[in-house]
Amino acid sequence: MAEKKSFRDAKKAKQDEFYTQLVDIENELKHYREHFRGKTVLCNCDDPRVSNFFHYFSYNFEQLGLKKLITTCYKNQERDLFSQHDSERAIWLEYTGDHNGNRIPDPEEIGINYFKGDGDFRSQECIELLKQADIVVTNPPFSLFREYVAQLMEYNKKFLILGNQNAITYKEIFPLIKDDRIWLGSTLSFAKFKVPNYYQERSSRFWIDEDGQKWRSFGNICWFTNLDVAKRHENLILYKKYSSEKYPHYNNYDAINVDKTTDIPIDYDGVMGVPITFLDKYNPAQFEIVKFRKGDDDKDLSINGKCPYFRILIRRRHRPIPYSVDEEEAMPMAAAS
Ligand SMILES: C[S@@+](CC[C@H](N)C(=O)[O-])C[C@H]1O[C@@H](n2cnc3c(N)ncnc32)[C@H](O)[C@@H]1O
């Protein structure tokens, strides 16, 4: 039994081993520059030898006006990846900016520290670093996503992290979205990620390029954050008119079904069931989230016995909510009160 579990854990750990491209980090991070001035950033699932998060923040340290960058490295399951390293122990790095004026993070400017343990983000050593951080930015292990987010919430941290779009549907994550404590970032993509040499998969989502580099992609990948971002204040422009033929009513909830976010009718004031991709366009001043997925009978929303794929029940707000101008106060004022 224990053997089976450790095999399963090792398999999961291997599946979690993929690396974010710099371009994906740049495309998202450019929307949050004002949040980083004077802040300590923690990348806590990042081997600095492969992490483009470390690369991005160390090279943009002065431009962003950062105070400190801390990067922690989890002891890898695969010895191969560490073969050039003279220690198997997990490390953490600390960078406080360019001191010799060449605008490059030189090795002598980066403090290398050794963990007693394996660098697990849940370990006390890592939690002490988390406490120092103002903003956590990384692509965490997808298999531990729930625990990872729970920890960020527990320590009341600002964050910007990558995750699978399916995480929206997790029972631990959706309530945070509904309560406006987490939202989606700016970019939504079918991002591709580098994977280590040992990686093997029979799937169209795994390939090897002409240089021998292995890659994998996922379905939709998105950013989850609690940093305010301009996109969240943009109204979704609507064009469609409601008709009872085009928008069937659910049998087990007083709401209509809308198959595409762009089809949300402009003139319907009741509750509407929309696909989870709606969250990419969600402006909490324009719509409120009422409920997720289930009808009054606590079964999946259904129309004549058929259940459309997960629906979020939303309702238009009649009076837009004013936003607080305080940068720290990212929630709409009415929702916060
Ligand atoms: C999806 S990968 C992303 C790596 C890197 N953040 C990036 O974006 O390139 C997740 C990383 O989390 C690390 N990891 C797995 N379990 C961990 C844990 N319990 N604590 C800290 N890191 C962990 C893995 O080794 C893996 O490198």
Image (tube, grey):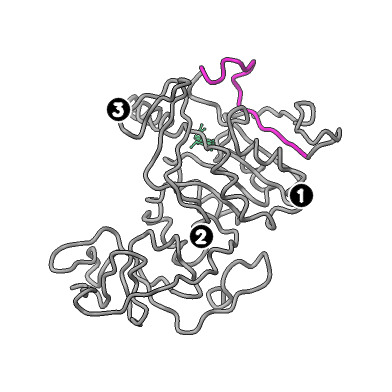
Do the residues under discs 3 and 1 have CB atoms within 8 angstroms?
A: no
User: SS for tag 3?
Assistant: loop
Q: In the image, is residue 127 above or below residue 155?
A: above
Residue at x 56%, y 19% (from the top left corner): 82
Q: Is mark 2 within 8 Å of ligand 1?
A: no
Residue 65: numbered disc = 1
Residue 241, image x, y percentages: 31, 79
Residue at x 51%, y 60% (from the top left corner): 182
Q: Report how many numbered discs are placed on residues in the image.
A: 3
Q: Is mark 3 within 8 Å of ligand 1?
A: no
Residue 83 inside the magenta-drawn segment = yes
User: SS for tag 1?
Assistant: loop
Q: Residues within 10 Å of mark 2 (few under 14, many from 20)?
A: many
Specify start and end residues of the magenta stretch as a single range. 80-96
Tell me the residue that label 2 is attached to.
182
How far apart in space, not on screen, are marks 1 and 2 (Cα)?
A: 25 Å
User: SS for tag 2?
Assistant: loop
Choose between 240 and 264: the one closer to the eye. Answer: 240
Q: Residues within 10 Å of mark 3 (few under 14, many from 20)?
A: few
Q: Horizontal placement of 167 versus 154: left or right?
A: left
Q: Amino acid at mark 1?
A: Gly
Q: Amino acid at mark 2?
A: Ile
Residue 252, image x, y percentages: 20, 72
Choose between 203 and 39: the one closer to the eye. Answer: 203
Residue 202: numbered disc = 3
Residue 204, image x, y percentages: 31, 33
Kindly report which numbered mark, 3 or 2, lies closer to the viewer in this rendering. 3
Q: Amino acid at mark 3?
A: Arg
Q: Looking at the image, tell me whether mark 1 or mark 2 is earlier in sequence order.
A: 1
Q: Farthest residue toward the right?
A: 100
